[in-house]
Image (cartoon, helix red, strand yellow):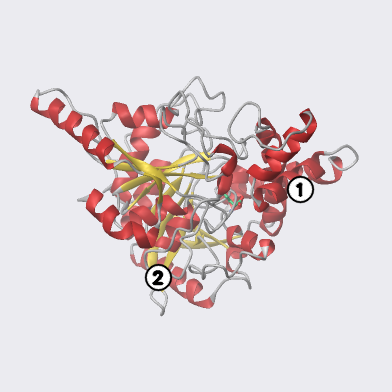
Amino acid sequence: AFLSAVQQREPTLRSFLWMDSEDVLRQAAAVDAKRRAGQPLGALAGVPVAIKDVLCTKGVRTTCASKILANFIPPYDAHVIERLKAADAILFGKTNMDEFAMGSSTENSAFQQTRNPWDSTRIPGGSSGGSAAAVAGCQTPLALGTDTGGSIRQPAALCGIVGLKPTYGRVSRYGLIAYASSLDQIGPFAHDVTDCALLLQVIAGHDARDSTSAPLPVPDYRAELENPVRPLRIGIPREFFDKGLDPEVESLVRQALREYEKLGATLIDVSLPHSPYALAAYYIVAPAEASSNLARYDGMHYGHRTSQKSDLIGTYAKSRGEGFGKEVQRRIMIGTYVLSSGYKDAYYRKALKVRRLIKQDYDHAFQECDVLMGPTSPTAAFRIGEKVNDPLAMYLSDVYTVGCNLAGLPGLSIPCGFTREGLPVGLQLIGPPFSEEKLLRIARMYE
Ligand code: GLN
């Protein structure tokens, strides 16, 4: 059924960079054979899961939607892929994304433009736009994305589905091609909170191959899912309802908050005083780390090498110039600039200090409340091409999501209604570190 949905909708949506229907059927047959043989089956037996093309899949091309990795075939699986295989899930294609996960609209893919299933003239959000569109377009029930500054939550909101960015360290990054290592996390996309919990259960947990992976037990995310959190104190950060917020998005989010009040929750006005600086700090820290992580693509070790004859340095420069798209080049330049001698104290070190203050704001807020709620993104899905020549306007779509990554916290986006034009809007829930179990329960109350 899902393969035929892919066949039908893919010409419009263009969610997938790679899909092999025969391989999918082979995997399904293998799971079925296991079932017939009476062997125990994993938690996702026979369930398709689409994979963002930033996650290494053994023997299957992994491109990060970049020309520089156009022919890269990893010799190993990412940790999350191993987990999916062990759970008998069906690996269901590799999804489109912004090149190296840099972007908010999936327009930075070197290969194709994914469209929003609710309105094909609009972007699906980004950078995990292919995964979000594939789930929202019913091409797959589940997908994996990655979130460095909002890339799971924002496309989930703009496509009207559930998307979770786990606590930093909850899911191993082994085999995730790094963008900004201190911010990146892998997480699930699903149609509802229960499915989201199911997929998180499979991918969460310690892995010694990622030194930042947390050696903590993984709770049973579904055990208490139907049990509402009472009493429930919801913090409403003042700064999340600022002048950049679209009035229609604001009214839908406020309506959702009133629903929670009807369910017995108390709404508390809180402040995250440093959040006006979050975006600026993020757009220093993330490019700084990216410029270092992307230094390995030199035309020698991996992927694209220029065909123009040159000396060593010339080969590096030409390969990188040909292989990386404009936005990636812009990030590398910003990153090397903020790390360069004479500037690193003024920019990079200062951004790290701001990051610490932002973390403290959240710690402070969680002394008064169980969860923070607000909009996921300041607007609904915008039109393809609308912001592509204005990087600063594009960066603004992450204004409510980047704080969570800077502070390492879990964040969840759930649908909370539609604009008059019929575009979905997301409600964002942010919790203290490792509170995924509670966040999912709180989200489930609203469904
Ligand atoms: N849009 C943000 C960026 O371009 C976040 C991307 C992400 O979370 N991967 O950096």
Which numbered disc flags the more N-terminal residue, 2 or 1?
2
Q: Is residue 200 left or right of residue 175?
A: left
Q: Position of residue 377 (x, y in %)?
A: 53, 63
Along the line of sight, which residue is nearer the eye, 334 or 190?
Answer: 334
Say which amino acid is labelled 2: Asp
Residue pictured at 63% horizontal, 73% vertical: 243
Is the residue marked by circle 2 packed among few (<14), some (14-19), or many (20+) residues within 10 Å? some
For disc 1, the marked residue is: 334
Numbered disc 1: secondary structure: helix
Numbered disc 2: secondary structure: loop
Say which amino acid is labelled 1: Ile
Report whether residue 384 is seen: yes
For disc 2, the marked residue is: 119
Q: Position of residue 280 (x, y in %)?
A: 72, 54
Along the line of sight, which residue is nearer the eye, 416 or 235?
Answer: 416
In the image, is residue 423 above or below residue 413? below
Q: Position of residue 374 (x, y in %)?
A: 51, 62
Along the line of sight, which residue is nearer the eye, 199 or 93?
Answer: 93
